[in-house]
Amino acid sequence: MLQRTFSIIKPDAFRKRYAGAILAEIEKAGFKIVAIKRLSISKTQAEGFYYVHKDRPFFPSLTTFMSSGPIIPMVLEKDNAIADLRKLMGATNPANAEEGTIRRKFAASIEENAIHGSDAEDTAKFEIGYFFAGYELA
Ligand code: CMP
């Protein structure tokens, strides 16, 4: 089933100039880039995006990190996009990520883990809508 997911190249990967290499991995894996942009977000905007994690101990640090520099949010499309992107990214903690995954190659720590990908249909919908207007997805 053709499906869309949402992804972010995070500030750590952007700072290290890994954005192009990560995009190449994504395209090589068969994803179509439907929408993409580069922007910086405020701490408040990061808190809104990660609201589901508001009670987790890492929430303050995560939202400071996500607002620490430019990010690249994007909408990706392919069959089974949500699960396939998560597989391509690897485990949240790069120490546990399989060989060949994006986090294994490009992530430094469980927090500064290079890339985000939606974990389900409903979160993908929320996350796409958080960063992109309908006209940007036509
Ligand atoms: P992401 O897939 O964007 O979803 C939530 C983010 O919180 C996660 O990637 C990490 O960047 C961060 N995160 C998750 N677990 C931890 C943790 N135990 N300590 C610090 N950051 C975490």
Image (cartoon, rainbow, N blue to C red):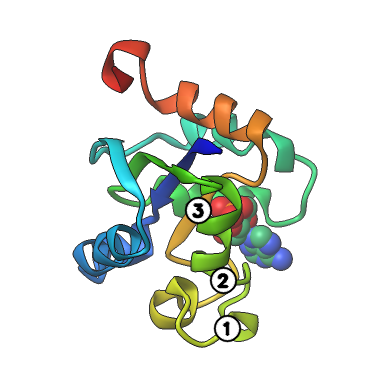
Q: Amino acid at mark 3?
A: His
Point 31% across, 45% down: residue = 32
Q: Return the disc, 1 or 2, that comes first in the chain's sequence.
A: 2
* Numbered circle sitting on residue 98: 1
Q: Return the disc, 2 or 3, that comes first in the chain's sequence.
A: 2
Expressed as whole percent of the image width and height from the top left, the position of residue 72 reads 30, 46
Disc 3: which residue: 116
Point 23% across, 41% down: residue = 38
Label 3 neighbour load within 10 Å: few <14, some 14-19, many 20+ = some
Point 38% across, 76% down: residue = 106
**Mark 2 or mark 3: which is in front?**
2
- How far is the residue under mark 1 from the one under mark 3? 16 Å
Q: Amino acid at mark 2?
A: Gly
SS for callout 3: strand
* Numbered circle sitting on residue 90: 2
Circles 1 and 2, Cβ within 8 Å, touching? The answer is yes
Quarter of the render that holds ligand 1: bottom right
Residue 108 can be seen in this image: yes
Answer with the quarter of the image where residue 94 lies. Answer: bottom right
Circles 2 and 3, Cβ within 8 Å, touching? The answer is no
Expressed as whole percent of the image width and height from the top left, the position of residue 125 reads 56, 26
Q: Amino acid at mark 1?
A: Glu
Circles 1 and 3, Cβ within 8 Å, touching? The answer is no
Label 1 neighbour load within 10 Å: few <14, some 14-19, many 20+ = some
Camera-side residue: 14 or 64? 14
| Mark 3 sits near ligand 1, with its Cβ under 8 Å away | yes
Point 57% across, 47% down: residue = 82
